[in-house]
Amino acid sequence: MADPFDTLGLEPKFDLDAQAIRRAYLARSASLHPDTATDAARPSAKADGRASAHLNAAKRIVEDPERRANALLARLGGPATDQDKSLPPGFLMQTMEMRERIEEALASGGAASRTEIERDATARRAAHIDRVRELFLAAGSAPSPDALRAIRIELNAWRYIERLIEQLDPAYDPDIADFRP
């Protein structure tokens, strides 16, 4: 897929305003509309459909902070998830403890326990989002390999926390979902 930032004509950065994303999407979408192109410039229906599909996919990526961070990291030349699965020191132990608490809460059916764990997990997610934001800002436009790796590590941890939050959903089915990042 083409770079989602280029597809939407957005500046490639982590902090994007939802309204800026919407405006960029609507502007690009309008330019694809058959009524706005001249007969000579009008793309075929098939090409128009592909362009719209790419535009919609780009919008979904940049609207989701985690997917946007991964796209930005890829654009900057950083490692993909399958290239570096590293996590912050001590993270796995904390995650295993939280997972045990989740399993106990789900087994007991205790809504209060689940709510407490969900608050904790949501706070952890917010901390990872803030850390990713800080790392992107510090990295600048020509980040070092170490800076890119630090971002990947935080993104990996963020993904683990997202999976834990998914497990807190009462409709969560462990036979369907798993904890692979």
Image: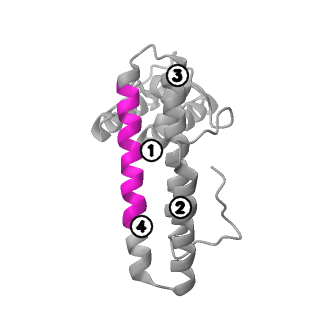
- Dot 3 crowding, Cα within 10 Å, few <14, some 14–19, many 20+: few
Give the colouring mode of the picture.
one colour
Does dot 4 land on a helix, a strand or a loop?
Answer: helix
- What residue does disc 2 label? 164
Residue holding disc 4 = 118
Horizontal and vertical percent for residue 102? 52, 71
Mark 1 touching mark 4, by CB under 8 A? no
Main SS, magenta residues: helix
Q: Examine the rendered structure and indicate whether residue 19 appears above or below residue 39.
A: below
Residue in view at x 66 percent, y 70 percent: 174
Give whichever of 26, 147 is nearer the camera.
147
Residue lying at 30% horizontally and 34% vertically, measured from the top left: 20
Which residue is identified by label 3? Answer: 146
Q: Which residue is mark 1?
A: 64
Spot occupied by residue 151 in the image (x, y as percentages of width and height): 49, 32
Sequence-wise, which precedes: disc 2 or disc 4?
A: 4
**Position above or below: 112 against 25:** below
Discs 1, 2 touching: Cβ within 8 Å: no
Q: Quadrant of the N terminus?
A: top right
Toward the right, the furthest residue is 175
Q: Which residues are magenta?
A: 118-137
Mark toward the start of the polypeptide (3 vs 4): 4
Name the N-terminal-most of marks 3 and 2: 3
Q: CA distance from mark 1 to mark 3?
A: 25 Å
Q: Secondary structure at mark 3?
A: helix
- Residue type at numbered disc 4: Glu
Camera-nearest label, 1 or 2 = 2
Is the Cβ of the residue at disc 3 closer than 8 Å to that at disc 4? no
Disc 1 residue crowd, few under 14, some 14–19, many 20+, Cα 10 Å: few
Residue type for callout 3: Asp
